[in-house]
């Protein structure tokens, strides 16, 4: 059975690298949200534009959901229907974490909007790369920040707390991997955790 696997985590946790590694090792389709389609690339420019300082929280959530609607329709569902597994760098759970827990939008409303946007297709498995808060804060100090990265420590603490809450509430779907050690070490832990889950 083809699987829809999402990688989630805060910025700088290494999830893009790990998603690419797993896709290469397994032959799955590698994709991303936001910006996994041409339409999504255009929507993403608004979300990340540091000169945008008046985007309403609900509009932000709807742009992320629009990106996702296009991505599911154009990339994820067709790949699954063709029998390919899909590995996505971020998913609906990013909107729940960032716009729901981070911005403080109603979590159930964000779920419902995304249930409609995805026509009910949610990831089968979420690999959550859990990095210590101080590691993330330190990595962000060294980067040029986009709109989300510049949102402040408290925002990011709410986001990571939200991720941990969602993971704890849905242990069948979520695989928590400590983002500690070398790229190879973390890749090994992910492979072993997914193999154990498949058995
Ligand atoms: P990334 O593409 O480098 O992972 O960064 C994406 C940023 O966009 C990250 O800060 C999280 C944010 N984001 C949301 O706020 N909501 C979403 O639904 C998605 C997919 C990303």
Image: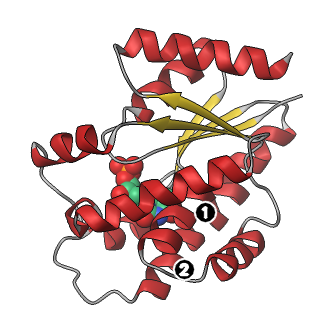
Residue 134 vs residue 41, the one in the foreground: 134
**For disc 1, does the CB lie below 8 Å from ligand 1?**
yes
Secondary element type, mark 2: helix
Residue drawn 41% across and 28% down? 179
Residue 34 visible, this orientation: no
Locate residue 104, reporting x and y percent: 47, 80
Residue 193 vertical placement versus 87 (above, below): above
Q: Quadrant location of the C terminus?
A: top right
From the image, which quarter does the N terminus lie in?
top right
Which color scheme did the rendering employ for the protein? Answer: secondary structure
Image spot of residue 145 (x, y percent): 17, 57
**Could you tell whether 175 is left or right of 105 in the image?**
right
Looking at the image, residue 170 sits to the left or right of residue 104; the answer is: right
> Horizontal and vertical percent for residue 191?
62, 15
- Seen at 66% across and 48% down, the residue is 168
Q: Of label 2 and label 1, which has the lower sequence position?
A: 2
Whether ligand 1 has any atom under 8 Å from the Cβ at mark 2 is answered as: no
On the image, the x and y values in percent for residue 126 come to 65, 41
192 vs 122, nearest the viewer = 192
Quarter assignment of residue 134: top left
The local crowd at label 2, few if under 14, some if 14 to 19, many if 20 or more residues have their Cα within 10 Å, is: some
Query: In the orientation shown, which residue stands out farthest toward the right?
Result: 1
Pointer 1 residue: 68
Q: Residues within 10 Å of mark 1 (few under 14, many from 20)?
A: many
**Number of the label disc, if any, that sits on residue 62:** 2
């Amino acid at each position: 059975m083809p699987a829809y696997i999402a990688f989630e985590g805060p910025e700088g946790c290494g999830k893009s690298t790990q998603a690419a590694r797993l896709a290469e090792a397994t032959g799955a389709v590698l994709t991303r949200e936001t910006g996994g389609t041409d339409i999504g690339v255009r929507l993403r420019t608004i979300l990340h534009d540091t000169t945008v300082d008046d985007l309403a929280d609900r509009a932000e959530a709807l742009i992320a959901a629009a990106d996702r609607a296009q991505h599911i329709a154009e990339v994820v569902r067709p790949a699954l229907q063709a029998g390919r597994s899909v590995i996505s760098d971020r998913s609906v759970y990013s909107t729940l974490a960032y716009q729901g827990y981070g911005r403080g939008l109603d979590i159930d409303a964000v779920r419902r909007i995304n249930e409609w946007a995805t026509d009910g297709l949610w990831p089968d498995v979420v690999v959550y790369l859990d990095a210590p808060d101080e590691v993330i804060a330190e990595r962000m100090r060294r980067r040029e920040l986009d709109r989300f990265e510049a949102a402040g420590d408290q925002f990011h603490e709410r986001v990571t707390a939200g991720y941990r809450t969602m993971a704890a509430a849905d242990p069948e779907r979520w695989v928590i991997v400590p983002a500690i050690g070398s790229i190879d070490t973390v890749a090994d832990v992910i492979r072993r955790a997914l193999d154990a889950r498949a058995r």
